Image (tube, rainbow, N blue to C red):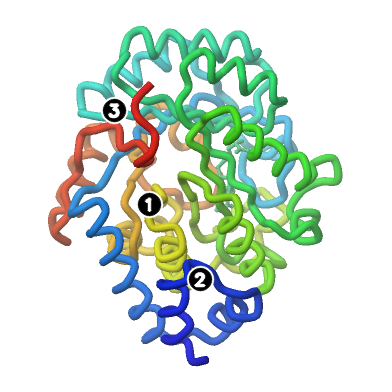
Amino acid sequence: MNNHALIDKLNTAKALQKAEWVQLFSTFTENDRLYAAGIARNIADNIFGKNIFIRGIVEFSNYCKNDCYYCGIRCSNKNAVRYRLSKEEILACCEEGAVLGFMTFVLQSGEDKAYSVAELCDIVRAIKRRFPDHAVTLSVGELERADYEALYAAGADRYLLRHETANEAHYARLHPEKMTLKHRMQCLRDLKDIGFQTGCGMMIGSPYQTDACLAEDMLFMKSFAPHMVGVGPFLPHTDTPFKNEPQGSYEKTLFVLSLIRIMLPHTLLPATTALGTIHPFGREEGIKAGANVVMPNLSPVAVRKKYMLYDNKICTGDESAQCVNCLQSRLAKIGYTIVKTRGDYLAHEAR
Ligand code: SAH
């Protein structure tokens, strides 16, 4: 089958065989990419209209016990200047976000054990008390099921935990031995089972990723049926073992975004900061390829440059309000509007 026919098949069957995925990833042309983007954007427009959801991301700590080879805040990076925000500082970021119209706060950090699960629960409860109509998304890494249950009970609505790769051997080349794909996948199953709107995802072009790996990512996502998918290009960070590895492909990232939208029509799919970093119009092109979420930064300007997962991350010098205004006008230029609603997955009502 030629690639257009494969993309049509994906659109009707919502699934492809592994070999078909490999064919798409290894042989797609610019014409194929634009063909998929057209279908994907049409699907998103039919479901969400010309509306884009926003999530305010609060990067509340860059301490991390893990040592992922790709990540700038890995524990071995002695050049990273570490910080953590207090509960009051986190609440102040949310307050600023609420004034700007954000209805979702994403709390992301390294795996920083200085915050106990009880403390995280206390922070979530405080946010939900002060902003009862807002959604809280957590992205704080791998925990045990009981911890996730406690965080859900405290009021957290959603959880982002990229699976990073669905291939065991590839996972082992991106992470030290004590991190396992098995545990990460268990976390994802637990999160979904508990009731979180759950997000997985992967980088495009991470070192040692093959088209077979990406095919396995697509097969995994088909069966897992996440509510959200985070996908961006791999970008090297100078203080990591992958500093000399090439960055991921911009076009391939856009192509993957479109294929995810076609396969999982209702998924909440951000045009990521990494996509905006690899290309000046990356986020706009991500929207045109089928994404329907943007995640501007709400972290205090004083710490932004310290949450450096990869080199040259954008928007690290701007105030939160500037980021929102900038995105608003960028999206308006391509015919999209930021909507100030929670933007839940369709089947999930506000709790
Ligand atoms: N500690 C949390 C948050 C991780 S940071 C967790 O484990 O989930 C969020 C995401 O940034 C990661 O899941 C990873 O996919 C992405 N990321 C990290 N380093 C990156 C890099 N060098 N280039 C692109 N994306 C990166």
Q: Eyeballing the image, is 213 above or below 232? A: below
Q: Position of residue 307 (x, y in %)?
A: 51, 36
Q: Is residue 276 left or right of residue 181?
A: left
Disc 2 designates what residue?
A: 249
- Tell me the element at label 2: loop
**Residue at (56% x, 47% y) in the render:** 200
Disc 3 designates what residue?
A: 103
* Picture disc at residue 266: 1
Q: Is residue 301 left or right of residue 27?
A: left
Compare residues 342 and 318 and report the one nearer the observer: 342
Dot 2 or dot 3, earlier in sequence: 3
- Alpha carbons under labels 3 and 1: distance apart: 19 Å
| Local crowd size for mark 3, using a 10 Å CA cut-off: few (<14), some (14–19), many (≥20) | many
**Residue at (43% x, 28% y) in the render:** 58
The part of the image, by quadrant, that contains residue 30 is bottom left
- Dot 2 amino acid type: Ser
Of badges 3 and 1, the one in the foreground is 1
Compare residues 273 and 51 and report the one nearer the observer: 51
Q: Is residue 294 left or right of residue 50?
A: right
Q: Position of residue 247 (x, y in %)?
A: 56, 65
Q: Is residue 79 left or right of residue 159?
A: right
Q: Position of residue 9 (x, y in %)?
A: 46, 78
**Residue at (59% x, 66% y) in the render:** 205
